């Protein structure tokens, strides 16, 4: 698991970006939506842009480049130009610290989300 920090390091309505490590080249963005934490790959699947720099509205984040929106719960895009989902990752809070368990693939993320 990747250490993100303390919960208070992620303000309400904001995101932090962490390097994924463990062989993954894609950084991860962790969002705080009304106290719920969500983690997704921090790269828009349409074009290389940081989703942590995007606009958060509810459980949706809008890419700052071309306005593709992604559901933080599923990683699914809600409309063009993005057509490919981003990976979602499990967020674990233990002993006052936030961790992300990196998902291997988009398919695995979908299975975990459906479970």
Image (cartoon, grey):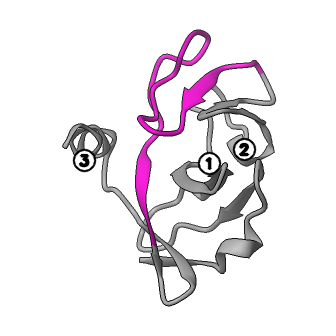
Residue ID for mark 1: 42
Quarter of the image with the C terminus in it: top left
The magenta stretch spans residue 73: yes
Specify start and end residues of the magenta stretch as a single range.
66-92
State which mark lies toward you, 3 or 2.
3
Q: Quadrant of the N terminus?
A: bottom left
Which mark sits nearer the N-terminus, 3 or 1?
1
List the single residue furthest toward the top: 80
Left/right of residue 99 with respect to residue 33 in the rendered view = left
- Mark 3 vs mark 1, foreground winner is 3
* In magenta segment, residue 30: no
Crowd around label 2: few <14 · some 14–19 · many ≥20 (10 Å): some
Q: Are marks 1 and 2 in contact (CB under 8 Å)?
A: yes
Element type where label 3 sits in the image:
helix
Disc number at residue 50? 2
Q: CA distance from mark 1 to mark 2?
A: 5 Å
Instruction: Give the SS element for disc 2.
Output: loop
Residue receiving disc 3: 112
* Label 3 to label 1: alpha-carbon separation: 19 Å
Residue at x 77% of width, y 52% of height: 14
Residue 108 in picture, x, y percent from top left? 24, 46
Q: Residue at x 56, y 54 (%)?
A: 36
The answer to which image quadrant residue 79 occupies is top right
Using the numbered discs, state the Cα–Cα distance from disc 3 to disc 2 in whole angstroms: 24 Å
Q: Quadrant of residue 64?
A: top right
Q: Could you tell which of marks 1 and 2 lies nearer the N-terminus?
A: 1
Depth check, front residue: 76 or 14: 14
Q: Which residue is rendered at x = 41% and y = 35% of the image?
A: 74
Residue 111 placement (x, y as % from top left): 21, 41
**Along the polypeptide, which appears first: circle 3 or circle 2?**
2
């Amino acid at each position: 698991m990747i250490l993100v920090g303390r919960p208070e390091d992620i303000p309400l309505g904001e995101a932090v970006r962490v390097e994924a490590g463990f062989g993954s080249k894609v950084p991860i963005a962790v969002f705080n939506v009304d106290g719920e934490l969500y983690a997704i790959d921090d790269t828009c699947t349409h074009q290389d842009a940081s989703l942590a720099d995007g606009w958060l509205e509810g459980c949706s984040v809008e890419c700052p480049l071309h306005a593709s929106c992604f559901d933080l719960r599923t990683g699914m895009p809600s409309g063009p130009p993005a057509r490919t989902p981003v990976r979602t990752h499990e967020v674990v809070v233990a002993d006052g610290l936030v961790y992300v368990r990196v998902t291997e693939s988009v398919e695995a993320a979908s299975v975990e989300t459906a479970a």
